[in-house]
Image (cartoon, grey):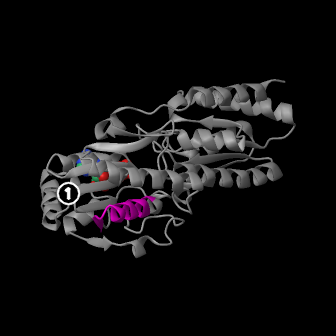
Amino acid sequence: MRKIALLTSGGDAPGMNACIRAIVLTSLRYGLEVYGYRHGFNGLLEQEYLNLRAKNVANIIQRGGTILNSARCLTFKSDDAAKVAAKNLDILGIEALLVIGGDGSFRGAKHLANHWSGQVIGLPGTIDNDVDGTDATIGYYTAIETALDSIDKVRDTADAFERIFLIEVMGRHAGFIGLNAAIASAADHIMLPEISRSCDDELENILAHIEAVKKRRGNTSYIVVVTENLWPDGVTSLAQILTEKTQIECRPVILGYVQRGGSPVSQDRVLATKLGAFAVEAALEGKTGVMVGEINQEIVCTELENSWLQKKPLDPYLVKIQQDLFDILKRP
Ligand code: ADP
């Protein structure tokens, strides 16, 4: 193999740059030329790329975002687009393409693999951790820290004003960030897609808990961590309902995009470096149609489809103890 390429696609995640760095330096170590396509799959269609050298990846390991830019490219779903991408890769003489992104990007990678004879390998880069075949995705640990930091700060006001705060965290349709940030911040209550109840049951449950906790603690400060897309009309509407029902001021806080940014924590940098180096070695061994991930400290390859067909479960023990702590707070 002489030429390898990479791109970052979908939602950006802290640690993508660390991963780019590891891919570039490992490729150079093996004597490969490395090309970085810009703006996700758009770069493949527009033939927009950079020839990457060691100097391009100096001093980027600590930076959030991605030096290659990321993007969504809806047109890439068509067969014609994949054929154009395949032709452009062949024109440059690329033999393997590494795609850093989430499950959507892996669907894109698989789609390309159906139309291109080169090798395609995925690397899990998303804060949501909603990709099977790896214990953690690149960016996930940093997102937990960011959410935790914000929840700690909101708690100061919740305590000072004796208010209820609903804090919406990201996760798309997975509760990984929510569960971990809630446990680490000692949130009073949590709403996760994996253990969601009907709206009526959820409301009844929270109201009873707020009442019990108020009696036990003698104040009305209360923190709920809510995963996005969970409450039908969003946390703002849930906050209004809770204010009316409890007569305690309830405020929504939507953490939003701050969770995608920032300097990656060490776990994300180390994971990104490990997976980046391994992906290049896997390409040199001829692997294709797989995603690289880490399970129990071992680096493994998973068929690309399995990364999205299998739903990764939350840690059942963490779910149990969150529930146990919730129940203890209710006791008089
Ligand atoms: P993420 O990779 O973070 O899950 P998205 O779901 O937005 O992000 O997907 C990123 C990009 O992957 C899309 O904009 C599109 O270019 C490509 N993609 C997603 N699904 C498909 C598909 N079924 N076929 C081809 N390309 C896809």
Q: Which quadrant is home to the N terminus?
A: bottom left
Residue lying at 49% horizontally and 39% vertically, measured from the top left? 135
Q: Give how far across and how far down residue 138 sits, in percent.
A: 47, 51
- Residue 320, by quadrant, is top right
For the stretch drawn in magenta, the main secondary structure is: helix
Asked whether mark 1 lies closer than 8 Å to ligand 1, one says no
227 relative position to 95: left or right: right
Magenta span contains residue 25: yes
Q: What range of the chain is rendered magenta?
A: 19-36
Examine the rendering and report whether any part of residue 161 can be seen.
yes
Task: Estimate how packed mark 1 is, as few (under 14), some (14 to 19) or many (20 or more) residues with alpha carbons within 10 Å.
Answer: many
**Residue farthest to the right?**
218
Residue at mark 1: 95
Q: Secondary structure at mark 1?
A: loop
Q: Nearer the viewer, residue 288 or 101?
A: 288
Image quarter of residue 29:
bottom left
Residue at screen point 70% across, 44% down: 185
Q: Residue furthest bottom?
A: 55
Which quarter shows the C terminus? top right
Q: Residue furthest front?
A: 30
Is 125 in front, or is 200? 125
Q: Is residue 71 visible?
A: no
Q: Is residue 52 above or below residue 82?
A: below
Residue sitting at x 63%, y 47% = 167
Amino acid beneath label 1 = Glu
The magenta stretch spans residue 1: no
Percent position of residue 153, x then y: 72, 55
**269 left or right of 106?**
right
x and y, in percent, of residue 189 in the image:
67, 36
Query: Is residue 297 shown left or right of residue 76?
Result: right
**Residue 21: percent from left, percent from top:** 43, 64
- Camera-side residue of 208 and 136: 136
